[in-house]
Image: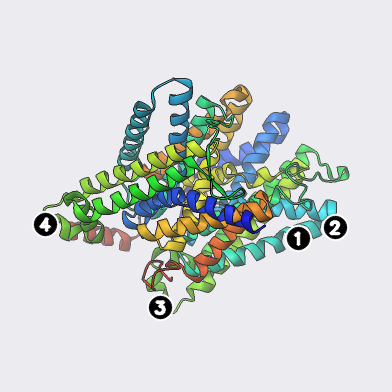
Amino acid sequence: MKKDLKDYLNIKTLLLVLLVALVIFIPVWGNRRYMNIAILVLMYIGLGESWNLLSGMSGLFSIAHALFFGLGVYGMTIGMTKLGLPVVGGILLGLAANVVMALIVGFVGSKLSGLYFTMALIALHAIIYTLAGQMSFTGYALGLSMPREYLMSRRALYFLVLGLAILMMLIFVWVRKSRIGTNFVALKENPDLAVSLGSNIRGWRILAVIISAMMASIMGAFYAFYMMANTPEVFASTISLRIIMVCMVGGLGNVWGPVMGCWLIVFDELVRGVMPSKFASFAVVVYALVLIVMALLKPKGIMGSKIFQPKETDARSVENKKAAAKAQK
Amino acid sequence: MGSAILGYVLNGICIGGVYGLVSSAWSFQCGALKFANFAYGASIMLSMYITYFSIREWNIPLPIAVLIVLVMDICLGFLMRKTVLWRHDRNTQILCTMGLSLIIINLVDFVFTSYPRDFGILETRIFFTDSISIGRTQLICFVMSAVILITFQMFLSKTWTGRSIRAVVQNKEVATLMGVKGARTLDLAFALSYILIAVAGIMLMSMYQVEPAYGDRMQSIAFIVCVSAGLGNLSGAFMSGILVGVLEQLIVGLLGAQFRTPILYGLFVIILLARPHGIFTRKQNVARSI
């Protein structure tokens, strides 16, 4: 079927054009504060893709995703300040730490599922969070600061994180389209059936955790350059909550989910700039309320709503629908 | 040294009784009723704060304060069941209760401020020898939690309501056929399990100081106790609560307080991997292997 111009004029294209325009115009027009918000938003989009790959696509519900993110930050800062590695070395150190952690988490996830996996992840997260604040190697509760010569301008950081976010989206799409993604979805939808069809479910689960952890680790390495320091607060559960938020509001298992959900980060940062610090805890309350409402009433998120569903134009799906309607009667 | 270790063990047994009470409530909710309640630590923390403020700041006499905390917790449990726990999807439950716990923590932080609170009771200690002693409050709490747990077990096994709760837990459809209102019984059971949380909160307030992050600590202990006893095993939870209490006192006393979380949680992960169905139970189909 040949498509003419009219087929492309729908709400998706409109949103995409708006998004591209926004991405281009922010560094031209933006002052420092808006640039900061834009950088954070793009970072959360990248992290959201990482969470989406693990939880939305392969069904292992990661409640403490800041664990992988924080390990990436710590790998970078420790590599830079304590070991004197170059930038690539810092990234690799973070990746190595994350692969080790992902192997542990993936091993747990391959043996246990559901509630037990969540509890194990919380436990591992608590171990790392506590140790990070107590060891001299990680700089105690104050953290380490990066060498000054790596300080980058906001504009450079913006384009760096833009590239990274797009890279994460591409990785997500590539995984989803490939054979790996098919297996991930299979073990989310029906693990028993996937096993009976000969899918190595343990291997795929470990692989899902490793890919997701590496994606989060790279975003963490970027965050080290953005903050130029680290504290144990990079492991804080508010970061995990934001990552989950972005995906839950946008849409689970969809590459555009985090992009659609990121307005919450913008909202939060804008409000936080205005409010006195005494009311800072209310931002978390609003977050958590939105999270609960979305999880209960709209589990598929914004991308699950009707306008974003693909149109069922080909004959077969229409026929299927008719048959389903008939069967219901 | 020997008497110091004996002192730690005795203290650990007394505190462990309260831990057993704390975690048997979670074990009941999570293992038996199949409600993954991660707002559990926050609920304990909230009832501790209410206890402190109603006695110290608002000058309410003790019996009425206890009544207030009990009623508040039952209402909280009932509301949770009606608002966030009506879906039977596990992930939704985990997410919603996590969100709820953050709401409770941040609201407490805002209303009561995050300054740590303490009754500061000067405890009378019962001396066995010159160096071995236990606190009177601790001993009373241990006995009380044992009595409450035994009463709860009796309630579950002897009364009609308790039996209907167990019937609904075992097989909801058959229980409904026998004339038990399934959903309503679950509401009731969840609200009742919040009584245990309220009592545990009152007891913990008499021993420890409370701050908004205190709930996480209790939650961690509940995880370890429940998993080592097997989820849903109430009397086992009391025994392994004592075990965890002794272990914690020994770690804090001999190694230092900073090793508490890593060692306890590390042990938890190892138990979870090696024997997910509990140390004391025989192999059952508790954790799904795939």
Label 4 marks which chain's residue? B
Using the numbered discs, state the Cα–Cα distance from disc 1 to disc 2 in whole angstroms.
9 Å
Identify which amino acid the numbered label 2 is placed on: Leu
Name the front one of labels 4 and 3: 4
For label 1, the crowd category at 10 Å Cα-Cα, with few meaning under 14, some 14 to 19 and many 20 or more, is many
Name the front one of labels 1 and 4: 4
**Residue B272 vs residue B244, the one in the foreground:** B244
Using the numbered discs, state the Cα–Cα distance from disc 3 to disc 1 in whole angstroms.
38 Å
Helix, strand or loop at disc 1? helix
Q: Which residue is mark 1?
A: A93
Identify which amino acid the numbered label 1 is placed on: Leu
Same chain? Circles 4 and 3: no
Of pointers 1 and 2, the one earlier in the residue sequence: 2
**Residue A183 vs residue A67, the one in the foreground:** A67
Report the quarter where the C terminus of chain B lies: bottom left
Q: Which residue is mark 3?
A: A197
Of pointers 3 and 1, the one earlier in the residue sequence: 1
Q: Residue at x 58, y 40 (%)?
A: A19
Q: Residue at x 81, y 44 (%)?
A: A145
Helix, strand or loop at disc 4? loop
Q: Which residue is mark 2?
A: A85
Q: Which residue is mark 4?
A: B178
| Quadrant of residue A34 within the rendered picture | top right
